[in-house]
Image (spheres, helix red, strand yellow):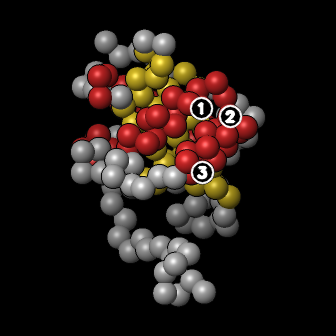
């Protein structure tokens, strides 16, 4: 049975870190990265209108989470409100999978992003998550590229 999602709170930071690390399986995550993520969640959840997260509690921890960011840009056809959202993390604890938790937290996050005026919402889907996101109405947009520190054109 799927529990009702609730907004994440600062005291959820350790569990959000645990779920986020599970999603990044195989990535080299330093202690500094871990403490920065956890401290940022503690500082911003419930107080920063640009950070939205929903969780499903279970067994004294979290069964699932969805974390998103609200961005402000310029007005345009793809961004009619000037605001857009990006879903950065959707994660379900392996012991709680196949119960609808990912759908519940993602749906709650999408609704919250719309409620704060996001005219567009994006995410990067894993192969395992793509069917859920397609079912929720997400579609592919080609041509997305990144430039990051250490890349040839960065410096």
Q: Are marks 2 and 1 in contact (CB under 8 Å)?
A: yes
Q: Earlier in the sequence, mark 2 or mark 1?
A: 1
Q: Residue at x 46, y 22 (%)?
A: 62
In the image, what residue occupies the spot 67% across and 40% down? 39
**Residue beneath disc 1:** 13
From mark 2 to mark 3, how far is it between C-alphas?
15 Å
Secondary structure of residue under mark 3: helix
Q: Along the polypeptide, which appears first: circle 2 or circle 3?
A: 3
Measure the alpha-carbon separation of dots 2 and 1. Answer: 6 Å
Q: Which mark is residue 3?
A: none
Residue 112 appears in the figure? no
User: How many numbered markers are drawn?
Assistant: 3
Left or right of 114? Residue 143 is left
Q: Which mark is residue 42?
A: 2
| Neighbour tally class for label 3: few under 14, some 14-19, many 20 plus, Cα within 10 Å | few
For image coordinates 49% across by 81% down, the residue present is 151
Q: Which residue is mark 3?
A: 32
Contact check, label 2 and label 3, Cβ < 8 Å: no
Other-residue count near label 1 (Cα within 10 Å), few / some / many at <14 / 14–19 / ≥20: some
SS at mark 1 in the image: helix
Image quadrant in which the N terminus is located: top left
Q: Secondary structure at mark 2?
A: helix
Label whose residue precedes the other's in the sequence (3 or 1): 1
| Disc 3 + disc 1, Cβ < 8 Å | no
Badge 2: few (under 14), some or many (20 or more) residues near its Cα, within 10 Å? some
The residue at the point 66 percent across, 64 percent down is 73
Q: Nearer the viewer, residue 21 or 141?
A: 21
Q: Closest to the observer: 129 or 79?
A: 129
Residue 98 in percent (x, y) is at 24, 25
């Amino acid at each position: 049975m799927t529990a009702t999602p609730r907004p994440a709170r600062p005291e959820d930071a350790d569990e959000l870190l645990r779920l986020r690390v599970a999603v990044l399986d195989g990535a080299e995550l330093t202690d500094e990265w871990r403490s920065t993520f956890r401290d940022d969640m503690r500082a911003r959840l419930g107080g920063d209108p640009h950070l939205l997260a929903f969780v499903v509690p279970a067994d004294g921890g979290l069964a699932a989470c969805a974390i998103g960011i609200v961005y402000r840009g310029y007005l345009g056809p793809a961004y009619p409100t000037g605001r857009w959202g990006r879903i950065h993390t959707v994660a379900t604890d392996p012991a709680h999978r196949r119960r609808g938790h990912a759908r519940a937290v993602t749906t709650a996050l999408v609704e919250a992003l719309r409620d704060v005026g996001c005219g567009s919402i994006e995410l990067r889907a894993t192969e395992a998550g793509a069917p859920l996101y397609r079912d929720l109405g997400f579609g592919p947009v080609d041509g997305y590229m990144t430039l990051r520190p250490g890349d040839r054109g960065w410096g």
